[in-house]
Image (spheres, rainbow, N blue to C red):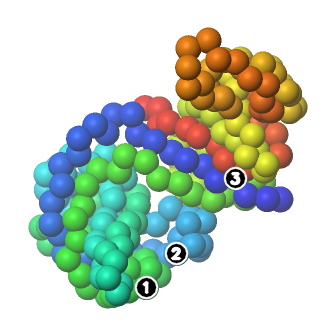
């Protein structure tokens, strides 16, 4: 089956604390198959004090800036937090695969609580999403990480967005006056646009969600 690209946002992350940390590759961190390519959620180990200082909950983002020619590129990784008090203060351990993604086994980085990330998951591994509707809360398990997610929207394999006010999962061509599907540039504008209904089907490729606690 094709993949769902699941976008997961944390509504409780507003202006996260940031800190400079040392990031190291460690054999103590288990590799999740597919994590380097965004098909699994990688893990990161850090101690309780570092977690508290950063105000972390379930996920942490590690970010570096690399110079390539005359351009500066930001490389980010989003990780499931695992507390391990054998990890020194202000240090984060990651897997070998994720070290390859950053291009080093040890480096300085900025760390902060994750606002949003995306992961590609085979549809067969998240069966609770098929048939669910915008507004539903579903339990999923991604790479061994149990999550409760509220569906907020999505789009199909042709880029047509789902609409909360259109029942079912089929495509419909409707006269719209507001997003999603149409963004008027003047008051009172209306236009016929193709959209998807509010139910997730196998034709949906992106699912937008928020974390529920």
Q: Earlier in the sequence, mark 3 or mark 1?
A: 3
- The residue singled out by tag 3 in the image is 4
Question: Distance of mark 3 from mark 2, alpha carbons?
Answer: 17 Å
Task: Name the secondary structure under disc 1.
Answer: helix
When asked about the image quadrant of residue 124, the answer is bottom right
Q: Which residue does the image show at 15% across and 66% down from the upper left?
A: 20
User: x, y percentage for residue 33?
Assistant: 59, 74
Q: Earlier in the sequence, mark 1 or mark 2?
A: 2
Q: Earlier in the sequence, mark 3 or mark 2?
A: 3
- The residue singled out by tag 1 in the image is 100
Task: Name the secondary structure under disc 3.
Answer: strand
Which labelled disc corresponds to residue 36? Answer: 2
Asked if the residue at tag 2 contacts the one at tag 1, i.e. Cβ–Cβ closer than 8 Å, the answer is yes
Quarter of the picture holding the N terminus: bottom right
Residue at the limit of the structure toward the front, as seen here: 186
Q: Decide: few, some or many residues near mark 3? Use Cα within 10 Å; few <14, some 14-19, many ≥20.
A: many
Q: Which residue does the image show at 43% across and 48% down from the upper left?
A: 116
When asked about the image quadrant of residue 174, the answer is top right
User: x, y percentage for residue 183?
Assistant: 60, 28
Question: Distance of mark 3 from mark 1, alpha carbons?
Answer: 25 Å
Q: Does residue 155 appear in this view?
A: yes
Q: Which residue does the image show at 55% across and 47% down from the upper left?
A: 7
- Nearer to me, 74 or 109: 74
Q: Taking 187 as reference, is 203 left or right?
A: right
Q: Does residue 129 appear in this view?
A: no
């Amino acid at each position: 089956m094709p993949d769902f690209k699941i976008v997961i946002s944390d509504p409780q992350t507003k202006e996260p604390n940031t800190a400079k940390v040392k990031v190291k590759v460690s054999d103590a961190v288990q590799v999740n198959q597919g994590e380097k390519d965004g098909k699994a959620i990688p893990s990161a180990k850090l101690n309780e004090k570092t977690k508290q200082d950063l105000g972390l909950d379930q996920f942490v983002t590690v970010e570096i800036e690399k110079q390539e020619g005359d351009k500066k590129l930001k490389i980010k990784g989003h990780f499931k937090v695992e507390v391990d008090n054998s990890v020194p203060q202000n240090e984060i351990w990651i897997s070998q695969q994720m070290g390859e993604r950053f291009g080093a086994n040890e480096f300085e980085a900025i760390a902060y609580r994750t606002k949003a990330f995306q992961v590609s998951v085979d549809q067969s591994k998240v069966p609770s999403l098929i048939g669910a509707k915008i507004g539903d809360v579903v339990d999923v398990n991604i790479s061994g990480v149990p999550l409760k997610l509220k569906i907020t929207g999505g789009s199909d394999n042709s880029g047509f967005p789902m609409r909360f006010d259109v029942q079912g999962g089929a495509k419909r061509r409707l006269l719209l006056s507001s997003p999603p599907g149409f963004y008027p540039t003047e008051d009172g504008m209306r236009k016929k646009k193709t959209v998807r209904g509010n139910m997730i089907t196998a034709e949906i490729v992106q699912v937008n969600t928020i974390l529920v606690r």
